[in-house]
Image (cartoon, grey):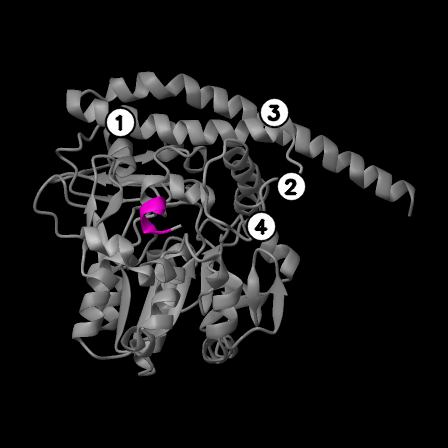
C-alpha cells in the first residue's frame, strides 16, 4: 500500500510530510481539511511511504521511540516509554494564567531558549489571513521569549508541517517542535531519512490529542454563537475566567471590533468528543499521548485536580535533558509538580484510550469484515470485546463526523446556519442518549466487579 491508498481511503491526516519530501504543497479542501497536492510521479516514490504516519507499520511508535528517546525507564501500553510522570503547573510568571491549562507548553519553550539549548520554537500561531479560504492558525517559528508567549493556548485546528520544515532547512539552528502525536511521528519518520531535519529539530513535545478538527468546525462554533464566518477574524478555543470550570470549553469568536463568548457545549456540534467535523484519519490512530515525543503535555483530568479552575497539566517525560531541567525548576519552586503513578497518568486520559483502543479495534474489524483496506496499527481488528452499546457509540460518532462536514458545506453555500443545525441536531441528541446509556452500563459493570472482588478477599 502507498500514499495513494491513504488519500483515496480518507486516511490522510494532512500532516504535510509527503508534500515536504516531494516538493509538493498542501491545500485546504471545501471541508476545511488539508490534503496533499503532489505531482503524479510522486505517488511512485516509495520514500514517501516511509514518512507517512499511516503506512509502514514496521516504523510504528514503539520502534521510533526506541530509536529516538533516551528516557525509557518505564513503559505502559498507551503511555509509551517514560522516565518521569508529573501533574501540576507553572508557578512563576503568567504562564499558567495565559495558557490553556497549567502553562507548561509555553514555559518549557521559554526555558530552552533561556538556556541556549534551542534557537527557535516551532509551534502553532495566528495566521495572517488575506481571504476567507485561509486557515486561522498555522505553524510559525518563535525566536524570543516574547514571541513564544504569543503562541500560548491550545488550538483545535488542522495544521501541516511542509512549509515550516522548508523554513527550518533554510535557516540553520536548533529547534523545539510542538505538535499533536501524528505530526511528531511524521517528524520522527522524516528524521530517519533527512539528516538536516534530524540535526536541527533538537527536541519534540507532543500535546495529548483527542482528534483533529477541521477549519470548518471553528467556523461552525462562531456561527452558532452569532458570528458569521465572513465576519470571523480569529478564534480562542478555551477561556480562563473566574467561575469557568477547567473542563468547560468556553470559546471567544472575534470579529472586527468585538468578540462573542460562549460555552462550546451550548453550540450544535460543539461538544468535542461527539466528533463533529473530526478527520476520518483520527478514527484510525492509536497514539493518544505522542509516544515518540521527548515530552508530552496535556490536561490532568483527575478528580483531585479538577476543582482547580486554573488548570493542571499532565506531563510525561522521555528525555534525560528535559527531566533535568524540570527537576531543577521543581527544586527552585518555579514549577509546582508532583509525581503521579502510571495508573493515574493513564486514568487522566481514559476516554481517549477507550476511543483509540477498543474503539479502534471495532472500527478496524468493521473495515476487515467489509473487505476494505485500513492502515495496520498496534491495535488488532477485533482485539477488544466491545459491548453492543459501545459499538453504537463508535458507529454514531463516525456518522456524526461524516454528516457534519457535508452539511456544514451546504450551510456555507446557502449562507444559512440552520441548514447545518437542522440536519445534525437530532442525530447529536441521539448520540448523547447512547453515550449516557453506555456510561450507566459501564458503571454498573464496574460496581459489580468491585463487589465480587470484595467478597473474595
- Which one is earlier in the sequence, the residue at label 1 or at label 4? 4
Residue to which mark 3 is pinned: 437
In this view, the mark in front (3 or 1): 1
Task: Report if the CB atoms under discs 2 and 1 are less than 8 Å apart.
Answer: no
Q: Quadrant of residue 282?
A: top left
> Residue at the left extreme?
130
| Magenta span | 2-6
* Label ID, residue 408: 1
Q: Secondary structure at mark 4?
A: loop
Q: Quadrant of residue 440?
A: top right
Q: Secondary structure at mark 3?
A: helix
Give me the residue at 50% from left, 35% from top. 367
The 10 Å Cα crowd at callout 4, few under 14, some 14 to 19, many 20 or more, is: some
Q: CA distance from mark 2 to mark 3?
A: 20 Å
Tell me which secondary structure the magenta stretch mostly adopts. Answer: helix
Residue to which mark 2 is pinned: 384
In this view, the mark in front (4 or 3): 3
- Which one is earlier in the sequence, the residue at label 4 or at label 3? 4
The 10 Å Cα crowd at callout 3, few under 14, some 14 to 19, many 20 or more, is: some
Give me the residue at 28% from left, 55% from top. 44
Left or right of 363 on screen, residue 26: left
In this view, the mark in front (2 or 1): 2
- Which one is earlier in the sequence, the residue at label 3 or at label 1? 1
Amino acid at each position: 500500500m502507498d500514499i495513494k491508498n491513504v488519500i483515496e481511503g480518507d486516511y490522510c491526516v494532512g500532516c504535510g510530510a509527503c508534500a515536504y519530501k516531494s516538493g509538493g504543497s498542501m491545500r485546504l479542501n471545501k471541508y476545511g481539511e488539508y490534503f496533499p497536492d503532489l505531482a503524479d510521479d510522486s505517488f511512485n516514490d516509495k520514500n514517501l511511504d516511509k514518512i507517512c504516519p499511516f503506512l509502514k507499520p514496521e516504523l510504528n511508535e514503539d520502534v521510533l521511540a526506541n530509536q529516538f528517546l533516551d528516557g525509557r525507564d518505564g513503559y505502559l501500553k498507551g503511555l509509551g516509554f517514560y522516565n518521569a510522570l508529573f501533574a501540576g503547573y507553572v508557578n512563576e510568571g503568567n504562564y499558567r494564567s495565559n495558557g490553556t491549562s497549567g502553562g507548561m507548553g509555553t514555559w518549557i519553550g521559554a526555558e530552552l531558549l533561556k538556556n541556549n539549548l534551542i534557537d527557535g520554537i516551532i509551534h502553532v500561531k495566528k495566521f495572517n489571513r488575506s481571504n476567507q479560504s485561509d486557515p486561522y492558525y498555522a505553524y510559525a517559528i518563535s525566536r524570543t521569549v516574547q514571541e513564544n508567549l504569543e503562541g500560548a493556548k491550545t488550538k483545535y485546528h488542522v495544521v501541516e508541517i511542509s512549509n515550516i520544515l522548508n523554513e527550518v532547512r533554510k535557516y540553520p539552528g536548533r529547534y523545539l517542535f510542538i505538535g499533536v502525536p501524528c505530526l511528531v511521528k511524521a517528524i520522527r519518520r522524516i528524521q530517519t531519512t533527512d539528516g538536516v531535519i534530524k540535526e536541527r529539530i533538537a527536541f519534540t513535545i507532543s500535546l495529548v490529542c483527542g482528534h483533529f478538527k477541521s477549519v470548518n468546525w471553528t467556523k461552525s462554533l462562531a456561527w452558532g454563537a452569532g458570528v458569521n464566518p465572513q465576519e470571523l477574524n480569529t478564534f480562542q478555543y478555551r477561556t480562563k475566567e473566574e467561575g469557568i470550570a477547567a473542563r468547560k470549553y468556553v470559546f471567544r469568536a472575534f470579529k472586527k471590533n468585538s468578540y462573542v463568548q460562549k460555552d462550546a457545549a451550548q453550540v450544535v456540534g460543539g461538544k468535542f468528543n461527539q466528533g463533529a467535523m473530526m478527520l476520518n484519519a483520527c478514527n484510525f490512530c492509536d497514539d493518544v499521548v505522542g509516544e515518540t515525543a521527548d515530552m508530552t503535555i496535556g490536561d490532568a483530568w483527575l478528580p483531585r485536580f479538577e476543582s482547580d479552575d486554573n488548570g493542571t497539566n499532565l506531563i510525561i517525560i522521555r528525555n534525560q535533558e528535559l527531566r533535568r531541567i524540570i527537576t531543577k525548576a521543581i527544586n527552585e519552586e518555579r514549577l509546582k509538580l508532583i509525581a503521579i503513578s502510571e495508573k493515574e497518568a493513564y486514568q487522566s486520559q481514559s476516554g481517549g484510550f477507550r476511543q483509540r483502543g477498543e474503539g479502534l479495534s471495532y472500527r478496524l474489524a468493521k473495515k476487515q469484515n467489509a473487505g476494505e483496506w485500513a492502515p495496520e496499527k498496534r491495535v488488532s481488528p477485533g482485539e477488544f470485546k466491545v459491548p453492543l452499546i459501545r459499538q453504537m457509540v463508535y458507529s454514531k460518532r463516525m456518522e456524526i463526523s461524516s454528516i457534519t462536514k457535508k452539511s456544514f458545506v451546504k450551510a456555507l453555500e446557502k449562507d444559512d446556519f440552520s441548514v447545518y443545525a437542522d440536519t445534525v441536531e437530532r442525530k447529536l441528541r441521539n448520540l448523547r442518549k447512547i453515550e449516557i446509556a453506555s456510561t450507566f452500563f459501564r458503571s454498573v459493570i464496574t460496581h459489580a466487579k468491585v463487589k465480587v472482588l470484595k467478597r473474595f478477599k
